[in-house]
Amino acid sequence: MIDHAGIAGALKKIGFDGVCTIEEFRPEYYEMALEENVKKAAEVTRAFVDKYFN
């Protein structure tokens, strides 16, 4: 399990005011169509940024 809150807190501490990350090493993502994969990545990234940086 990844400590998202801890990572976001550490980034804020050193001056980051936002971060974008795309997890690309999940086997289920390889089965998605490219457009579906991009939409999912954008959705998950927005949720993370909204939760920890807004």
Image (spheres, grey):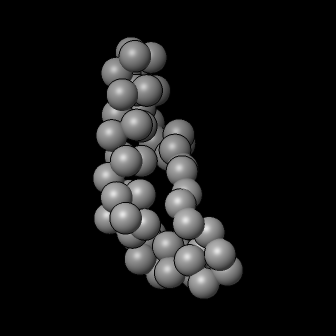
Q: Position of residue 38 (x, y in %)?
A: 43, 26
The quarter in which the C terminus is drawn is bottom left
Q: Position of residue 9 (x, y in %)?
A: 50, 81
The residue lying furthest to the right in this view is 14
Q: Residue at (54%, 50%) from the top-left corner?
A: 21
Q: Residue at (43%, 66%) from the top-left corner?
A: 53
Residue 33: image quadrant is top left
Looking at the picture, tell me which residue is in the foreground, 45 or 32.
Answer: 45
Q: Residue at (60%, 84%) from the top-left corner?
A: 13
Rendered view: 39 above or below 41:
above
The quarter in which the N terminus is drawn is bottom left
Residue 3 seen in the figure: no
Q: Position of residue 42 (x, y in %)?
A: 40, 37
Residue 36 seen in the figure: yes
Rendered view: 34 above or below 3:
above
Q: Is 45 left, or right, of 43 in this rendering?
A: right
